[in-house]
Image (cartoon, rainbow, N blue to C red):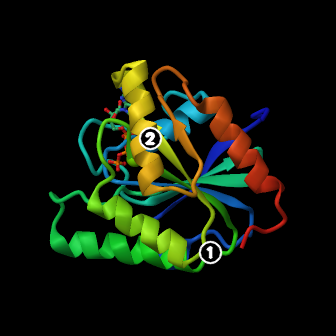
Amino acid sequence: MKIASVRLHASVYRLEDLPRDEKPEIVFLGRSNVGKSSVINSLLRMRHLARTSSTPGRTRGVYFYAINERFYFVDLPGYGYAEVPHSLRRAWSRLIEGYLENRPQIRLSLLIVDARHEPTPLDLQMREWLEVHRRPYIVLLTKADKLSTGEVKRSVERAARVFPTVTIIPYSARTGLGREAVWREIENALACPSSR
Ligand code: GTP
Ligand code: MG
């Protein structure tokens, strides 16, 4: 896809503030610090668009990036970050669940998992949620640059046992591995009139 324009359209901290226009949305999900914001930056080839950090819990709101004024990339806070106070965690999950549950314009979710590790129990919970709600999604095994070719292959095989019916793409925000394959999935999802 040719990227003509990218801008941060909205930073949302309360459900009432979600954008009301109905542009299609592509959502990035995954545990805290797994590399969601880095995937967004690498897909758009913009190093510093979405804020990234080696400290987990960097993304706090729901960020809507307007791409070509045609669709949004939606960067969510990660799940499973234990260090935040309980009340804050509850507010996050209210925001994220409220968003995910009532958003027919979500065309595709990208579930981002660390290529080095077994999917976590929270990843499995996310998988259940996506499947129960019949949401189209793909899995990205990110940080693949930290593995050898053989290890990446084994990581894909392991993920395929956990996500047997889902497209799995090894990815690296560092090297750009997987970028073209992910764009193809996004373009397909955007081309479907409605996938739900
Ligand atoms: P939260 O917003 O806190 O949930 O984190 P996030 O999932 O958005 O992760 P983020 O993109 O901020 O990346 C977390 C850390 O992982 C940063 O230090 C990144 O530089 C690093 N990182 C992300 N993607 C990759 C990758 O593909 N390869 C390597 N080697 N490091 C990565
Ligand atoms: Mg982030």
**For disc 1, does the CB lie below 8 Å from ligand 2?**
no
Residue 13 locus on image (x, y percent) = 43, 67
Q: Amino acid at mark 2?
A: Glu
Residue 147 locus on image (x, y percent) = 35, 24
Residue 165 shows up from this direction: yes
Residue at 41% across, 66% down: 126
Crowding at label 2, few (<14), some or many (≥20) Cα neighbours within 10 Å?
some
Q: Are marks 2 and 1 in contact (CB under 8 Å)?
A: no
Please give the count of numbered marks on the rendered protein: 2
Residue at 18% across, 61% down: 84
In the image, 75 versus 66, the foreground residue is 75
Local secondary structure at mark 1: loop
Dividing the picture into quarters, in which one does residue 72 lie? bottom right
Residue at 35% across, 73% down: 93
> Which residue bears the numbered disc 2?
157
Residue 53 locus on image (x, y percent) = 31, 37
Left or right of 77 in this view: 109: right
Residue 172 locus on image (x, y percent) = 47, 29
Measured in 3D between alpha carbons, the distance from the residue under mark 2 to the one under mark 1, in whole angstroms, is 32 Å
Q: Amino acid at mark 1?
A: Arg
**Sequence order check: which comes first, mark 2 or mark 1?**
1
The quadrant in which the N terminus is found is top right
Crowding at label 1, few (<14), some or many (≥20) Cα neighbours within 10 Å?
few
Left or right of 112 in this view: 103: right
> Disc 2 or disc 1, which is closer to the eye?
2
Q: Above or below — where is 60 with respect to 37?
A: below
> Which residue bears the numbered disc 1?
103
The quadrant in which the C terminus is found is bottom right
